[in-house]
Amino acid sequence: MTVGNIVPRVVKRALRLGAEVENIRLSDDLSDEVVAAIKQLLLEHKVIFFRDQGHLDDAQQQRFAIRLSSLVSNPTMVDISGDLRTRKMLADRASRIDTMSIDGCFSAARPKISMLRGAAIPLYEEHMAWSSTAAAYLDLPESLRMLADALWAVRCAAFDCAVTEGATEADKKCLDDVSTGTIYQTTHPVVRIHPETGERLLLLGQSVQNFVGLQRYPSQKLFERLQSYLTAPANVVCWTWKSGDVAIWDNRATERYSMKVGGRQVASDADVPVLTKLRSRAAEAA
């Protein structure tokens, strides 16, 4: 692939998704042609990786992300970034991964694209994996695929903002206006169609409580069966982080599996289309 004067090298990282893109220095002054090529690679490979992007800081990452689409914020994160729309969790600042999510999908709550930057990678955060929701759907046997097409999931998620050790008084004050201990519930179809590729996607997520019309136990067994197609080795790509790495993935076509990742973000990997406030955790306990 040749884009203008830039000759990027694309190296596939797994059988059905994931590619490393070499010879591109990410910045907001890339030509429209190069940005369009990056978007096309993202649609094709679902998740793309860039090494040696240590020149990026929060502001530069944001400016490049805006070239891909608009940014969305996450109300469960603490905003300590001033004019930037980057959200930072209260975590060890020496060991963080910076991420921002990009808007414009088939629901307001699930970001279209997420971009993750490795600022400093501790040993216990060096691995991450993504699975292809499109490949998982294609692998379903016909009978299970027909069931999934008509299936709706009930999702329940609790959002908390906790002050970690080492947080400053200013950080603690940032929590005053953030909703904590709140449980949210929603339903959504398990299979959706990608608005750009037309692919059918198997979308689950770890916050699924049960499926509409099924009790908890059969829902759990069905979830495990469907999830096995998402986590099949042929449908998963793994990435070993180094400082300066950048990953960009299509939230509509992938599910991400992280290991103890903290960091800055504009939006989390939200996967609930319409959130309805259910009850607070404190009220439930009472």
Image (cartoon, rainbow, N blue to C red):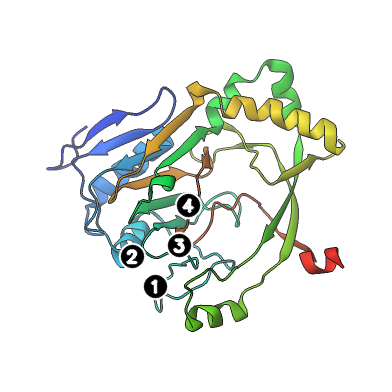
Q: Residue 84: give its label.
A: 1
Q: Residue at x 63, y 38 (%)?
A: 203
Q: Secondary structure at mark 3?
A: loop
From the image, tell me which residue sits under label 4.
261
Residue corresponding to mark 3: 71
Label located before the other in sequence (4 or 1): 1
Whether residues under marks 2 and 1 lie with C-beta atoms below 8 angstroms apart, the answer is yes
- Where disc 2 sits, the SS reads helix
Q: Where in the figure is residue 69, as x and y percent of width and height?
A: 41, 56
Sequence-wise, the earlier of marks 3 and 2 is 2
Up the image or down, 221 lies above or below 161; here it is above
User: Looking at the picture, which amino acid does disc 2 mark?
Assistant: Asp
Residue depicted at 84% across the width and 63% down the height:
284
Discs 3/2, front = 2
Callout 4 amino acid: Val
Work out how far the residue at label 4 is from the one at label 2, CA to CA, in angstroms.
17 Å
Q: Quadrant of residue 138?
A: top right
Distance in Å between CA atoms under marks 4 and 1: 21 Å
The answer to which of marks 4 and 2 sits earlier in the sequence is 2
Whole-angstrom CA distance, mark 2 to mark 1, is 8 Å
User: Would you place residue 135 above or below residue 66 in this image?
Assistant: above
Q: Earlier in the sequence, mark 4 or mark 3?
A: 3
- Give the mark toward the camera: 4 or 1: 4
Q: Is residue 104 above or below residue 212?
A: below
**Quarter of the image that includes the N terminus:** top left
How many other residues sit within 10 Å of disc 4, few (<14), some (14-19) or many (≥20)?
some
Residue 277 in which image quadrant: bottom right
